[in-house]
Amino acid sequence: GAGVSQSPRYKVAKRGQDVALRCDPISGHVSLFWYQQALGQGPEFLTYFQNEAQLDKSGLPSDRFFAERPEGSVSTLKIQRTQQEDSAVYLCASSLGGAGYTEAFFGQGTRLTVV
Amino acid sequence: GDSVTQMEGPVTLSEEAFLTINCTYTATGYPSLFWYVQYPGEGLQLLLKATKADDKGSNKGFEATYRKETTSFHLEKGSVQVSDSAVYFCVAAGAGSYQLTFGKGTKLSVIP
């Protein structure tokens, strides 16, 4: 596709509900990142994939957060038993290589509101 | 870990005014530095970057110089336009790292 696509754009979940957020990266991009952006803050790193391998999940805030990229393309971020503090914009980015050396392209994000 | 501190907003300027958004960083080694911009309703976009000391990144009339001695990467533009209204993020990527560390963002509004 032309850019990184995320769906849904908006998600309202009741506390305790499980949610799944989808990211379609730019075709051919090896690296895929997830970031969490709280209101009024900059994005914070969650996890990193190189192809299908999850090389770094150090930013995931708890074991309720799980990400996968089984075929090295589309990725899903799953949050189990959502809590109010999970409310944020979740950003996906992809790049040809590591972000330090090549440009990271960001999707528009999924705004998650937990009520 | 790495950290980025940038000027708090919001910033409101008249069209054709001079813009400076201050940014300082803390990182091990020599990070790559970036400015990302988020226009209303759009995703984050790379505005400019610098990968080593004294490099100057520039794009769309914006520029920023990587100053190792002051650990700074201030964003400047000589004459802003209404279309520059957006949120600007200063970003660092540690040497050899794929993780981007963002500042909190500065919202710029340019009025005619």
Image: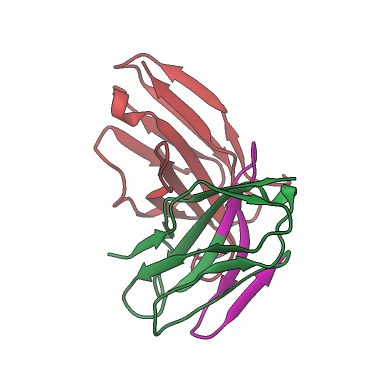
Chain colours: A red, B green
* Number of numbered discs on residues: 0
Q: Is residue A12 left or right of residue A80?
A: right
Most foreground residue, A49 or B16? B16
Q: Is residue B105 left or right of residue A83?
A: right
Q: Quadrant of residue A108?
A: top right
Horizontal and vertical percent position of residue A83? 29, 23
Query: Is residue A71 visible to the viewer in this orientation of the structure?
Result: no
Horizontal and vertical percent position of residue A92? 51, 44
> Looking at the image, which residue is at 45% across and 65% down?
B23
Does residue A93 belong to the magenta stretch? Answer: no
Does residue B44 belong to the magenta stretch? Answer: yes
> Looking at the image, which residue is at 43% across and 52% down?
B8
Query: Quadrant location of the C terminus of chain A?
Result: top left
> Looking at the image, which residue is at 55% across and 39% down?
A23
Q: Quadrant of residue B3?
A: bottom left
Most foreground residue, B76 or A28? B76
Give the residues in magenta.
B36-59
Q: Quadrant of residue A85?
A: top left
Horizontal and vertical percent position of residue A90? 46, 38
